[in-house]
Image (cartoon, rainbow, N blue to C red):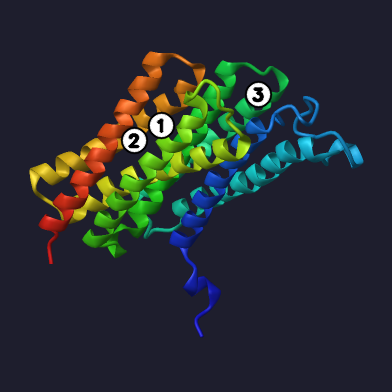
Amino acid sequence: MRSLRDRFGFPHLLAGTLVLVGATILLGVAAKATGSGLGCEANWPRCDAGPFNLFPAHIVSFYEWFHRFVSMFAGFAIIGTAVASIRRANVDRRVTALVVLGMVLTPVQVALGRETVQQYTTNILSLHFWTAILIFTLFVVATILVWAPRLTAGQVTTAFAVGSLTVPAHVGLSLFYLAPTTSYPPRVQIAQYALSLAVVSVAVFVVLVGRRHFEKRGVRSVLALSPLLAYLTVFFGRQSVVGYRLVELTYLGLAAVLTGIFLVGIWLTKSNARS
């Protein structure tokens, strides 16, 4: 039997770190959606119960505490992944640069998290979220680059198909807050942000893996457009909660175009796949 070290190497460490980063983002959304962002009574990094106030006192503060708890492990995983990428000679230097940049941004993200508790403002909260998305993107790119040699043209087509279903689902959940008489419950917010991460991941996947298998200009144009449209869709989707009709229409239009791009991508990659 192979040892665990042989079975699970740097690619698995990187993928595990990516999962932790994504989970941290969604737990942060859960804390905000449930109104638990200040559940620890503006204490940071402590909470509101137990020895030295290290633990949560009730379910409200639990959401915020658990978000911090998981983010701590995500931070350690980011640092460990960066150190491992530097020490391993066989790791692509592009991957090393990406995860090291993620490590550099992590203290910034921690400081922003502290500020969301100690002086809560919409701008700080937004910066905290988009810094998290940037770190997530860095690890998505790094993970795909590491695994790309094992991925096939058929999986690009599958990713386009997933994207063509994910974007309409994202819009469907948006109807909860676009409709003036409908509430926007926490479970819907969490689900929609999970779909946002999925849309971003699919778009990055198709361009990084697709360019290894497809050479025609038309296919490459669709591949290149996917990440730009995905990020714009996620951005305007998040901004549309402010209630401006123009922002809402922009979001819906971008979502329609992105879905169309994904559908075209399915057709082009299937018809141009190399044996």
Total tally of numbered discs in the picture: 3
Q: Position of residue 254 (x, y in %)?
A: 30, 29
In what element is the residue under mark 2? helix
Q: Mark 1 to mark 3: distance in Å? A: 22 Å
> Which residue shows up at 33% across the image and 33% down it?
255
Amino acid under label 3?
Thr
Residue 207 visible in image: yes
Q: Which of 245 and 204 lies nearest the eye of the viewer?
A: 245
Q: Mark 2 to mark 1: distance in Å? A: 6 Å
Which is more foreground, mark 3 or mark 2? Answer: 2
> Which residue shows up at 52% across the image and 56% down it?
16
Q: Vertically, is 201 above or below 42?
A: below
Q: Vertically, is 36 above or below 165?
A: above
Q: Earlier in the sequence, mark 1 or mark 3?
A: 3
Residue with the mark numbered 3: 116
In what element is the residue under mark 3? helix
Q: Vertically, is 203 above or below 113?
A: below
Residue with the mark numbered 2: 230
Q: Position of residue 74 (x, y in %)?
A: 60, 46
> Which residue shows up at 27% across the image and 48% down it?
206
Residue with the mark numbered 1: 234
How packed is label 2: few (under 14 Cα within 10 Å), some, or many (20 or more)? Answer: many
